[in-house]
Image (cartoon, helix red, strand yellow):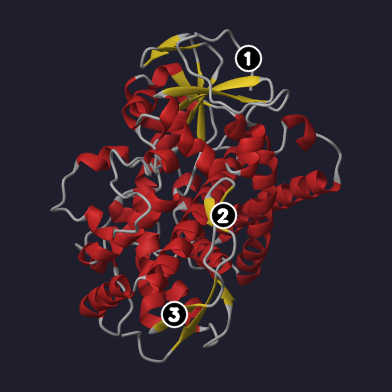
Amino acid sequence: MTASPVISPRTPTAPGALPLLGHAHRLARDPLPFITSLRRHGSVVRIRIGPTAAFVVTDPDLTRRVLVTEAAHFAKGGRIIDALRVFFGDGLATVADGDTHLRNRRLMQPMFNKAHIATRVDAMTDRIGSMVGAWPANERRDVFADMNDLALAAFLVALFGTDLPETLQAEFTALMPAVMKGTIRQTVLPGWATRLPLPANRAHAERVARLRTLIDLVIDHHDTAPTGASSTDAGTGQACPHAAPARAGLFTTLLTADRPLTRRQLQDEAITLLTGAIETTGTTLAWTLYEISRHPDIERRLRDEVATVCGDRPLRHLDLERLPYARQVLQEAIRAYGPAWMVTRTATRDVELGGHRIPEGADVVWSPYLHQHDPSYFPDPDVFDPDRWDPDRPQAARGAFLAFGDGRRKCIGENFAWSEMQIILATVLQHWPRMELVSRPPRPQAVVTVKPDSLTMTYGHGPDRS
């Protein structure tokens, strides 16, 4: 963050700031109640993180101005992005706005269209089915860890293909949780603290370096692997013009681009895709299973839908559109728990936003969690209600659903995320007729995502709850 600029007196300042700390103690101690409380003070509210000012946008319509209509004045940046860029480089999520971002987004867009994703569904379903089916019955399991493992496994198959050597798969699986934990630590510490030669900082840098080496090994594997026939669309049977060979993955699109990326660029993009696809998906699925466990009526509707569509066979691509209630449940979990709770942009010039002057260089903060708990858009926001996403319900609230962002920096993997989450949820329900929460109810813990602080469940083959 830059030094605190001169602030317009029209912009209210959140109460409770402390000398030197500003509002940092609130962000550390009770971030979710604090961020949602700002709505009471205005559509744009000034906070201080240490001596540095930031502007929190509490109105979804103004946030859409930041992300869409006036995006040129609000560049990708701020504390979180700057911290990620140090270790992950200039991947699609962290690279500055400009020609490089536009070129790489255009290059990667075909990887995430529905036709290309369709070629990955069977392999993802098979992999998830083998993992979920191997869980011992009635064993106490860490749901958040399990869902992150499933999300990583599915994405590894989709990204790198089905012929990735098992040794590489195993090392990715072992390494990524530690990389994610270290990344979260880097985003919440002051910048100067992350540069100290501390053991935790050195360990994180070494893990990221090893991750880059693993991606190099994947590139070398692709360079020496034989090519195969082109994939076909699972729905039409026609060849997909952007699809890689059947055993290959989405990463092949980057490796075979007309204007190839450098090794460093390939590493940056792969790391960005991996980190972006794991914890957000895993967080959503963990909260979804928790809510299912406490709402038997929702669980019954889900199980009935999956049984009607799939029967006893594994889910296939054409089934995804036939599981509308599963998508409603997942969307309600995303609404209720974020999963991201704070996102930053940087003003590129002095700009007016809702009657407030935002100075050049200031951090602008928006919060999907805050918007998605706004009772003006989502009545009874603390009630878990998948039916609020029923197509026959009024559409007014949809504009405040910003979990995937919006505009030119909207999450490129949204289509993939919906498919992956539906696959994992349906597969867990098919394999395990009974799920039971055996820990206390989890409390939301806001770090990068809004994760459950503790969530343990057992899975069994007995009858479903009546």
Farthest-out residue, bottom: 462
Return the mark for residue 4.
1
3D distance between C-alphas at marks 3 and 1: 51 Å
Quadrant (top left, top right, bottom left, bottom right) of the N terminus:
top right
Q: Earlier in the sequence, mark 2 or mark 3?
A: 2
Instruction: Tell us which disc is closer to us: 1 or 2.
Output: 1
Query: Residue at label 3?
Result: 435
Dot 1 falls on a residue whose secondary structure is loop
Q: Which mark is residue 223?
A: 2
Pointer 3: residues within 10 angstroms few (<14), some, or many (20+)? many
Amino acid, disc 1: Ser
In the displayed structure, 439 sits above or below 56; it is below
Residue 457 is marked as none
- x, y percent for residue 327: 29, 60
Residues at marks 1 and 2, CA–CA distance in whole angstroms:
50 Å
Type of residue at label 3?
A: Met
- Separation of disc 2 and disc 3 at Cα? 44 Å
- Secondary structure found at label 2: helix
Do labels 2 and 3 touch, CB within 8 Å?
Answer: no
The residue nearer to you, when weighing 247 against 347, is: 347
Q: Where is residue 331 in the image (x, y as percent from the top left)?
A: 33, 54
Secondary structure category for the residue under label 3: strand
What amino acid is found at the position of numbered circle 2 in the picture?
Answer: Asp
At a point 57% along the width and 76% down the height, the residue shown is: 141
